[in-house]
Image (cartoon, rainbow, N blue to C red):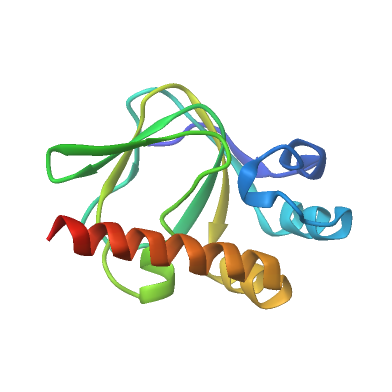
């Protein structure tokens, strides 16, 4: 499914330009890098499988991924976008599938590191809450 996986060494400098991490201090970015793993995947890789239990979420660093509900393409996400967080916050199965549309480099957060990120950094918690609210509004509008 995924290619190389390694500790996100030196990620702080790379993260500075990503929308999700805008406004984070240098100290916060260093901590994010400690909590995350770098993951690379080729075009076509299934990053998130709808209906499965979620154990990781990702921030897209490089590349683009398509979001699918069933067979319907609902969005394309690029650098700075977080995916997979709903399943970790709500403790529910994945609500959509995410497929790499190009080769991608992701920052992966397992459940433990994601919870630490939210606990230690109020700005991250605010971003995730805003993201969840927007996705829930979109889901309600689609129903």
Q: Is residue 124 above or below residue 5?
A: below
Q: Is residue 142 left or right of residue 137?
A: left
Where residue 18 appears, x then y in whole percent? Answer: 66, 40
Residue at coordinates 23% horizontally, 60% vertically from top-left?
139
Count of picture labels: 0
In depth, the one of 67 and 105 nearer the eye is: 67
- Residue 141 visible in the current orientation: yes
Residue at coordinates 79% horizontally, 53% vertically from top-left?
29
Where residue 35 appears, x then y in whole percent? Answer: 69, 59
Where residue 131 appears, x then y in whole percent? Answer: 46, 60
In depth, the one of 81 and 46 nearer the eye is: 81
Where residue 87 appears, x then y in whole percent? Answer: 36, 66
Q: Is residue 84 above or below residue 87?
A: above
Image quadrant where one finds the N terminus: top left
In depth, the one of 102 and 24 nearer the eye is: 24
Q: Is residue 27 left or right of residue 50?
A: right
- Residue 113 visible in the current orientation: no
Q: Is residue 46 above or below residue 126?
A: above
Q: Is residue 122 above or below residue 109?
A: below
In depth, the one of 127 and 110 nearer the eye is: 127
Image quadrant where one finds the C terminus: bottom left
Q: Quadrant of residue 75?
A: top left
Q: Is residue 130 left or right of residue 47?
A: right
Q: Quadrant of residue 95?
A: bottom left
Of all residues, the one furthest to the front in this rendering is: 141
Q: Is residue 21 left or right of residue 140?
A: right
Residue at coordinates 53% horizontally, 64% vertically from top-left?
128
């Amino acid at each position: 499914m995924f290619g190389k996986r390694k500790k996100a060494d030196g990620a702080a400098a790379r993260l500075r330009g990503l929308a999700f991490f805008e406004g984070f201090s240098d100290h916060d970015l260093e901590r994010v890098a400690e909590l995350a793993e770098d993951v690379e995947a080729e075009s076509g890789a299934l990053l998130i499988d709808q209906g499965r239990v979620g154990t990781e979420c990702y921030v897209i660093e490089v590349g683009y991924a398509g979001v699918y509900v069933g067979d319907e393409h609902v969005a394309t996400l690029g650098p700075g976008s977080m995916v997979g967080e709903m399943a970790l916050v709500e403790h529910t199965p994945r609500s959509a599938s995410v497929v790499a549309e190009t080769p991608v480099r992701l920052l992966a957060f397992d459940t433990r590191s994601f919870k630490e990120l939210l606990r230690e950094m109020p700005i991250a918690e605010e971003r995730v809450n805003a993201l969840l609210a927007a996705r829930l509004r979109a889901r309600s509008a689609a129903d």
